[in-house]
Image (cartoon, helix red, strand yellow):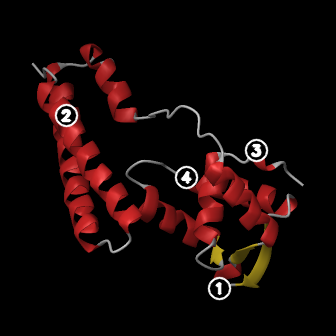
Amino acid sequence: MEHVSELNATAAALLGLLHEGPQTGGDLVSAARGRFGAFFSVTRSQVYRELPALAEAGLVRLGKQGPRSSQQYVITAAGKKAFKSWLVSEPGPDHLRSPLILRLVHAGSLTAKQRVTLVDSAKVTYSAGQDAARNAAKEATDPYEKAVAEFAVAHAKAVLKLLDAVPVS
């Protein structure tokens, strides 16, 4: 069985979601986007790569076969223990991986028109994200979910401030 200290953040995210009940890979992708999208991206390929490894490690087991050959996964007792161990372990440094900010670092290589397009598109995306996070913060009853939603609001606000500061001409 996989040693719990080697549990990566994506695996931990999936185990955390599986605490809510059996889910298919597609369910997990959707749930991750909804719950973590503002601060932790989980791609479809990561989910489908991670689930067999978690099953092999005994942290999840196969559940019911769903429609269109979808497979549910269920967290095991070992998976719950591994997730709890991961939760209380030292998180290490946070790494922001933002394709937008990476593009902004190199925006001097773009034409003025391309910079305007990049910035304007990002402003639309982050404004919508900020609105969604505000709604999530208002609706959250769990204090931890509320705090995370408020972080998402602040993050979107910070990115919008960055976009306002970027010279486009």
Q: Secondary structure at mark 2?
A: helix
Q: Amino acid at mark 1?
A: Pro
In the depicted structure, whether residue 6 falls above or below residue 136: above
Compare marks 3 and 2 and give the one earlier in the sequence: 3
Q: Determine which of the numbered discs, if any, sits on residue 67 in the image.
A: 1
Cα distance, mark 3 to mark 2? Answer: 40 Å
Spot occupied by residue 138 in the image (x, y as percentages of width and height): 22, 69
Mark nearer the viewer, 3 or 2? 3
Cα distance, mark 2 to mark 4? Answer: 24 Å
* Residue count near mark 1 (Cα–Cα under 10 Å), binned few <14, some 14–19, many ≥20: few
Spot occupied by residue 23 in the image (x, y as percentages of width and height): 63, 76
Cα distance, mark 3 to mark 4? Answer: 22 Å
Cα distance, mark 1 to mark 4? Answer: 22 Å
Compare marks 1 and 4 and give the one earlier in the sequence: 4
Q: Quadrant of the N terminus?
A: bottom right
* Residue count near mark 4 (Cα–Cα under 10 Å), binned few <14, some 14–19, many ≥20: some
Q: Would residue 41 appear left or right of 72 to someone viewing this image?
A: left
The residue identified by callout 3 is 5
| Residue plotted at (54% across, 31% down) | 93
| Residue plotted at (40% across, 34% down) | 99
Cα distance, mark 3 to mark 1? Answer: 35 Å
The residue identified by callout 2 is 119
Q: Determine which of the numbered discs, if any, sits on residue 43 in the image.
A: 4
Q: Secondary structure at mark 4?
A: loop
Compare marks 3 and 4 and give the one earlier in the sequence: 3
Compare marks 1 and 2 and give the one earlier in the sequence: 1
* Residue count near mark 3 (Cα–Cα under 10 Å), binned few <14, some 14–19, many ≥20: few
Compare marks 2 and 4 and give the one earlier in the sequence: 4
Q: Amino acid at mark 4?
A: Thr
| Residue plotted at (72% across, 66% down) | 80
Q: Nearer the viewer, residue 36 or 116?
A: 36
